[in-house]
Amino acid sequence: MKRTFSLGALMVLGLSVLLLGCGKEDNPVQAEQFGEISGTVTFVGSWPQVGEVQVSIWANWPPMGPPAAASVAFQPGQNVQTYKIDGLSKGTYPVVTVGWRDPNNPAGAKVLGVYWANKDSVGVADDGITLKVQPIAIEISDDKLVWNNIDIKANLDIVK
């Protein structure tokens, strides 16, 4: 009986050491962290009759294809509106734009404003394609995942 107890105790001790030696601390799994930007858009001019206006963040400039992410469309008629884009992967985004897309000609999108040093100016030529300024890049990283106050002025009259 004594021998059976000693053997059982030894097996429990060995199993405990084995299980404790394989703890999660040896191979920690970290959840992917995503970034976000938010701010205010101040609109000037007249709202277009058709199409949506929204904020987009681009992984390249000039843009090739769809943006990396975009906000929900703004409600027409309000001159100052807030936005938020979340779920952004880590990386450099060279430009944040306020844009309009014609539902009848999706390829003919127009840039109405861009995030840059002078928040009182849209920084875009009247053609809605040419940037007149150097935009400020957004870097989503472990050091800074959340970017607030990315405020932009947008000229709705570029649509016309």
Image: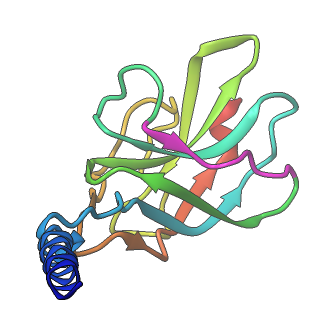
Residue 9 position in % (x across, y down): 20, 83
Q: Which residues are magenta?
A: 68-76
Q: Is residue 74 magenta?
A: yes
Residue 101 position in % (x across, y down): 66, 27
Up/down of 115 relative to 56, above or below: below
Residue 5 position in % (x across, y down): 22, 84
| Most common secondary structure along the magenta stretch | loop
What colour scheme governs how the chains and residues are painted in the rendered image of this protein?
Answer: rainbow
Residue 79 position in % (x across, y down): 78, 64
Residue sitting at x 51%, y 29%: 127
Up/down of 12 relative to 22, above or below: below
Q: Quadrant of residue 15?
A: bottom left
Q: Quadrant of residue 59?
A: top left
In what quadrant of the picture does the C terminus appear?
top right
Q: Residue 34 versus residue 71: which sits nearer the camera?
A: 34
Residue sitting at x 65%, y 65%: 42
**Relative horizontal placement of residue 57, taking residue 133 as reference (left or right):** right
Q: Residue 149 versus residue 80: which sits nearer the camera?
A: 149
Residue sitting at x 27%, y 47%: 94
